[in-house]
Image (cartoon, rainbow, N blue to C red):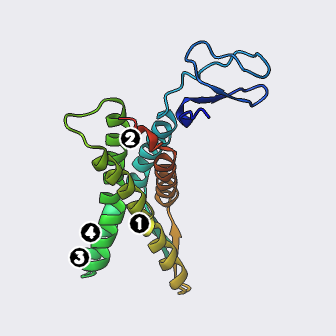
């Protein structure tokens, strides 16, 4: 019985028969069709999702996260303005949590994903596989925590029932949610086999 590594198997796009990958001379054993290798980079999906997440993160920090409508006058604040305002009002734990979850976590995740995507293609110095696995799983763990800011807006909007005050999620909330969503997709579409392959 011949045992073939699963990485050396390739499926026929016509009849879906499994064939042994023979580099440029792949012909299906069942239907005789030529099987072509896709020239796409194995990391291109992750790069596309990550770039989209970074682009969405820019308006998430420029536009107001939350708009307060009080007595007909509207006022909004960005993430950093909200953190500063909470700090000035003495809400130190909340301001620190929002600062970490909305600024440090997303930027850290962007940097870690960029490191992973670059290091699997261009190994850096004495880069260890274990370190890359640790970085990857860390991005998986911290990913959902960056949604804390959006949850805070939702909780505030639900708790404030005063007729004179209305809290509305701003443009930044949508952009931030989109950024987090695409960051999660970038992490999930990253193939961990690329780490093992180095």
- The residue most toward the left is 125
SS at badge 3 = helix
| Label ID, residue 145 | 1
Q: Earlier in the sequence, mark 3 or mark 2?
A: 3
Q: CA distance from mark 4 to mark 1?
A: 20 Å
The image quarter containing residue 17 is: top right
The reply, left or right, for residue 94 in relation to residue 37 is left
Q: Earlier in the sequence, mark 2 or mark 4?
A: 4
Q: CA distance from mark 2 to mark 1?
A: 25 Å
- The residue most toward the front is 1
Residue 32: x %, y % from top left: 76, 16
| Label ID, residue 84 | 4
SS at badge 4 = helix
Q: Nearer the viewer, mark 2 or mark 1?
A: 2
Determine which residue is flagged by label 2: 195
Residue 147: x %, y % from top left: 45, 65
The answer to which of 4 and 169 lies nearer the viewer is 4
Residue 71 at least partly seen: no
Q: CA distance from mark 3 to mark 1?
A: 24 Å
Q: Badge 1: few (under 14), some or many (20 or more) residues near its Cα, within 10 Å?
A: some
| Label ID, residue 88 | 3
Q: Are marks 3 and 4 in contact (CB under 8 Å)?
A: yes
Q: Are marks 2 and 4 in contact (CB under 8 Å)?
A: no
């Amino acid at each position: 019985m011949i045992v073939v590594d699963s990485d050396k198997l390739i499926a026929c796009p016509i009849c879906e028969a499994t064939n042994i990958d023979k580099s440029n001379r792949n012909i299906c054993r069942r239907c005789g069709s030529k099987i072509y290798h896709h020239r796409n980079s194995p990391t291109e999906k992750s790069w596309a999702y990550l770039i989209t997440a970074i682009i969405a993160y820019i308006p998430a920090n420029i536009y107001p996260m939350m708009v307060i409508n009080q007595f007909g006058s509207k006022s909004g604040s960005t993430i950093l303005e909200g953190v500063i305002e909470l700090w000035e009002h003495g809400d130190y734990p909340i301001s620190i949590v929002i600062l970490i979850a909305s600024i440090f976590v997303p930027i850290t995740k962007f940097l870690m994903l960029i490191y992973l995507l670059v290091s699997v293609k261009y190994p850096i110095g004495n880069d260890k596989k274990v370190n890359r696995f640790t970085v990857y799983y860390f991005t998986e763990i911290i990913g959902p925590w960056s949604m804390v800011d959006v949850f805070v807006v939702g909780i505030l909007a639900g708790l404030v029932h005063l007729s004179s005050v209305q809290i509305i999620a701003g443009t930044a909330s949508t952009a931030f949610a989109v950024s987090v969503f695409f960051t999660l997709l970038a992490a999930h579409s990253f193939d961990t086999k690329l780490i093992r392959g180095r």
